[in-house]
Image (cartoon, rainbow, N blue to C red):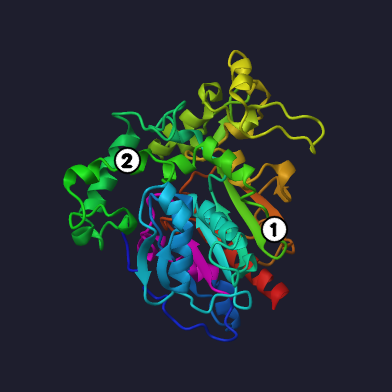
Amino acid sequence: MSGPSDTTSNLLPATLGEPAPLVIVEGFLGGVGETVWGHFQHYLNAEDDAAGSTRRRVIFANVGPVSSLHDRACELFYALTGGTVDYGAEHSTSNEHGRYGRAHPHGLYEAWSVTRPLHFLGHSVGGSTIVKLQHLISSGFFGRTHHPDMLLSLTSVSSPFRGTQIVYPLGEHETAAPAVRALSVGAALAQCVYAAAYLAPVLARVVDVRAEARALSFREASPAAAWACGWAQSRDAAPFDVTFEAADARAAAGEGAVHARTYYRSYAACMTEKCAEGETHRPSWRSLWSLPLQYGASLIGSYDFSVLRPIPSFLFPRPDDSSTMPPPFPSRERERDLESDIPAARLTEEYWANDGVVPVFSQWHPLECRSTRCHHHTKTTSVEKQAPHPGVWQKQAPHPGVWQVHLLEDAHHLSVMPVWVASRRQKEFWADIGAWLRDIDLLTT
């Protein structure tokens, strides 16, 4: 939630002939930027450095750490292009906040266009934010002069595209979301966010929740009004956006559809192992050092989906004919029919396998496999045995319009980012990303 200004090392003019920059979007409570991300650029650009080529520029685009995907995507767009953040008249009215947010006199990459596209990488909710951005661009939300091909590639790491059950034990109401249970972790976090928003005029350089459109600071609201705003218990906040209900709504609206000229890759981390009986999971003994994530992994790995209302779409029987899919939001009558026999036993283990925060199935891509184009790589084999790029997993030519899904085994939600610990896994990961982006550049220039 804190970190350097948006202008750190980013406000440089686009240079003809430079490789397409990489925009990094952080996840929930993110915003620390290069402060903790560390020395990854050395490995990202190692091959360019060795060849004496121009280094790839990295741009950290800060967005609201607890804001909804819609608000984060709008903030990301205007951070890059410049101008005052416009959340849209309809969205701001329906969610009862101001239409306009922070003003950016200068964009982080004002040359952004179809002819000067950008690579994007998102960690956790950052990946979902980028998908939302491409959807808004495709729908003409920012005007018809912008095109989804402005995103040359989209790489996600541990992103909760289809929701995560961890949000419910932490406070989100299982049958009445976005309501938050009192005396829960979520309720306590909400109070901290309200305090940060209220004290924003003096704390923004340390803790920046980017709540200008909500007018919650002490210059605009009384303490009682700020603490009673209800932001955390609305559908316009990150916790609700990672519920299965919100993910089903996005899928029903067609969000997350692949675009023919964008290259997609996701990394799904897993720190659990299958239990002896059934499909549920438990934390691997190799993850014992990360106690908070181990606890989260235990909650996700044994979660009972039958308690959720509305019933998640993945719990409903699927017909053999993929052309006749059931609606993502079943009728109340249909829910009552299923209440005594939720068919969760049909789910396979990836609904419980997880990285301590997000189940594996949700990290793959925004839509279910039958509704998108995807290729799942079954094993992350080090390329040291098979290819010239250290750390590249299953080296292959990139293909646009297809999600390339890679599994990070024995890895948790924070194994490769954002905190730099100089592990072998991190070094190989960033070398792999560098090779992947270079291959895309060669194919598209």
Residue 385, image quadrant = bottom right
Name the residue rendered at 36%, 62% in the picture: 101
Q: Nearer the viewer, residue 32 or 217?
A: 217
Q: Which residues are magenta?
A: 20-44
Task: Indicate the amino acid at tag 1.
Answer: Lys
Element type at mark 2: loop
Element type at mark 1: helix
Q: Nearer the viewer, residue 404 or 66?
A: 66
Toward the bottom, the furthest residue is 16
Kindly tell me whether residue 417 is visible in this rendering: no
Q: Nearer the viewer, residue 243 or 402?
A: 243
* Residue 327 % position (x, y): 67, 34
Is residue 94 a member of the stretch shown in magenta? no
Name the residue rendered at 42%, 53% in the picture: 92
Above or below for 154 versus 354: below
Kindly tell me whether residue 445 is visible in this rendering: yes
The disc label shown at residue 230, or none: 2
Residue 147, image quadrant = bottom right
Separation of residues labelled 1 and 2 (CA atoms): 54 Å
Image quarter where the C terminus lies is bottom right
Q: Which residue is mark 1?
A: 385
